[in-house]
């Protein structure tokens, strides 16, 4: 996970195994070195209490927040934990009001704040079937307030979600099973209850849409990316659409130059030009691809990215951010036979 602070210094968060369990780590670039912010973060002690899926955010006051899910060590149980950096150490945010159990987990969190400092967290709650849960932490509050998420009734068994804010408005994109289409599609909500348009999917008769991403322009226009899987071939493609004010624009396929595309990351600069990064295969190697839409056409930004040309390395899980000069920054995981590392790059235009 990658974010840029007010000075355009990158901050990254990741999960790392210490030989007993996984913990969350956060580091910031100071101009010459990576500086770890405190030690490893974990909500539970003991082996196999793996802390994973960190969501990172920097609020309007420059404070770094992180939320993650952590296994209870019993059954499939997972809980959420959140911390805030106070410039010298991590402060515990209040405990979440929903907890996991042997057969229940709450995980895959996403995080944002409004310009008033209110913190919002969405997550997936699975107890038999999946549903979205959401929580609000107002400035000065000592407890999270659960939010009733009013999605359309024919959007069932929700999966992962992503969240973004503009001013006091909160935008959420999520995937769900859509009964009329008999497949999974992407839906979007404004302020937890107002559905934005109809389903986002290009081929509801022959594809499944999952893994949404959302970002909002300076003018408050939401943009969404998602992944589609063709039921006939299992081919994965990355798609994009933007809100026109009354409906979603015709979806555009971005991933024409690669195959088996996954892990899309969406960002919008202050010039309102959207950019998307994803992991895809070209020339038999999984690498990171980046494209932008300066006008009406998507164009690649440079060649595919991977730190090593060795065929035994794979690049995945890109995180894309855009600085105040509208330059893209990327962080991604790169794995090979000896382990996995995180790489951070900035595009010099």
Image (tube, rainbow, N blue to C red):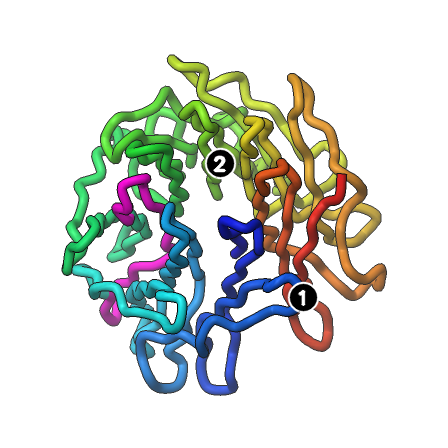
Find disc 1 in the rendering and name its residue: 32
Tell me the magenta residue range.
Answer: 100-119
Residue 249 sits inside the magenta stretch = no
Given residues 27 and 307, the one toward you in this image is 27
On the image, the x and y values in percent for residue 177 come to: 36, 37
Q: Quadrant of the C terminus?
A: top right
Q: Residue at x 51, y 86 (%)?
A: 19
On the image, the x and y values in percent for residue 312 come to: 79, 66
Q: In this rendering, is residue 35 above or below 131? A: below
Q: Residue at x 30, y 66 (%)?
A: 81
Say if residue 243 shows up in the picture. yes
On the image, the x and y values in percent for residue 70 come to: 35, 69
Residue extending farthest to the top is: 246
On the image, the x and y values in percent for residue 186 come to: 42, 33
Would you call the spot at circle 2 few (<14 residues within 10 Å), some (14-19), or many (20 or more)? many
Given residues 60 and 165, the one toward you in this image is 60
Would you call the spot at circle 1 few (<14 residues within 10 Å), some (14-19), or many (20 or more)? few
């Amino acid at each position: 996970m990658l974010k840029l602070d007010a000075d355009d210094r990158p901050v990254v968060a990741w999960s790392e195994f210490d030989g007993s369990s996984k913990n969350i780590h956060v580091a910031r670039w100071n101009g010459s070195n990576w500086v770890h912010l405190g030690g490893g973060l974990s909500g539970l002690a003991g082996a196999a209490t793996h802390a994973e899926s960190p969501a990172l955010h920097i609020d309007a006051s420059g404070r770094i927040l992180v939320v993650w899910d952590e296994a209870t060590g019993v059954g499939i149980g997972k809980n959420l934990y959140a911390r805030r950096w106070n410039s010298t150490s991590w402060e515990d945010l209040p405990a979440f009001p929903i907890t996991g159990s042997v057969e229940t987990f709450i995980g895959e969190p996403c995080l944002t704040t409004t310009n008033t400092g209110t913190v919002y967290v969405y997550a997936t709650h699975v107890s038999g079937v999946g549903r979205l849960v959401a929580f609000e932490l107002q400035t000065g509050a000592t407890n999270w307030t659960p939010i009733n998420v009013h999605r359309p009734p024919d959007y069932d068994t929700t999966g992962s979600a992503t969240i973004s804010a503009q001013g006091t408005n909160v935008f959420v994109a999520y995937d769900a099973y859509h009964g009329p289409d008999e497949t999974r599609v992407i839906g979007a909500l404004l302020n937890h209850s107002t559905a934005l348009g109809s389903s986002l999917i290009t081929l509801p008769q022959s594809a499944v849409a999952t893994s949404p991403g959302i970002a909002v322009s300076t003018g408050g226009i939401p943009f969404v990316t998602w992944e589609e899987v063709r039921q006939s071939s299992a081919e994965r493609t990355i798609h994009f659409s933007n809100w026109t004010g009354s409906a979603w624009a015709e979806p555009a396929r971005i991933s024409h130059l690669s195959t088996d595309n996954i892990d899309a990351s969406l960002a919008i600069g202050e010039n309102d030009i959207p950019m998307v990064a994803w992991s895809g295969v070209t020339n038999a190697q999984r690498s990171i691809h980046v494209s932008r839409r300066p006008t009406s056409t998507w164009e690649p930004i440079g060649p595919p990215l991977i730190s090593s040309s060795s065929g035994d390395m794979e690049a995945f899980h890109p995180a894309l951010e855009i600085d105040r000069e509208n330059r893209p920054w990327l962080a991604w995981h790169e794995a090979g036979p000896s382990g996995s590392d995180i790489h951070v790059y900035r595009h010099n235009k």
